[in-house]
Image: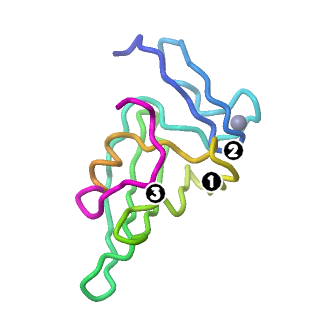
Amino acid sequence: MSTASEIIQCYDCGESYQYLGRQHHPGECPTCNSHCVSPAGEVSILTTVDVSAGEEISMVAVLAIDECRRRYLYHFSNTGGEARLLALRVGDQTVRSSNESTIPALPAAISSVVKEYLPITSIPHDSKD
Ligand SMILES: [Zn+2]
């Protein structure tokens, strides 16, 4: 596991690259120097919060950290019964996705907790399936 290469996605410029080092990637995009990049290693869920309006869940927030202890805060809205990523903060920076290539791919750990609340069907994901 520790020698496996990691795919890093930059949420600012959309660049994806493979990190081949033995340690976790430094959390910075080499192209634009943004720190809004995908998590290093496995993410751990710290907490989830769901907000309900009446009977229905209207929002789910997931706070997670990666193996470099960077914090990722995901906000999902309930859009027509599906979880949709509304906003993402990496550390203290807010990701502003401007086009399709910068839409953050969700780590499996994040998808699985969100699915406990709402089905995720509208978020582009890594092409693993
Ligand atoms: Zn970048």
First to last magenta residue range: 115-129
Placement of the C terminus among the 4 image quadrants: top left
Question: Which disc number belongs to residue 123?
Answer: none
Depth check: 37 or 105 in front? 105
Please tell me which residue is depicted at 43% across the width and 63% down the height of the picture: 76
- Where residue 57 appears, as percent x and y from the top left, is 31, 76
Q: Nearer the viewer, residue 117 or 38?
A: 117
The residue identified by callout 3 is: 74
Q: Tell me the residue at 54%/61% (across/down).
A: 87
109 lies above or below 95: above
Q: In which quarter of the image is residue 118?
A: bottom left
| Ligand 1 within 8 Å, label 3 CB | no
Disc number at residue 95? 1
Q: How crowded is mark 1: few (under 14 residues within 10 Å), some or many (20 or more)?
A: many
| Amino acid identity at mark 3 | Tyr
Q: Name the residue under label 2.
A: 12
- Mark 2 neighbour class, 10 Å CA radius: few under 14, some 14 to 19, many 20 or more: many
Circle 2: residue type: Asp
Task: Pick whichever of labels 3 and 2 is earlier in the sequence.
Answer: 2
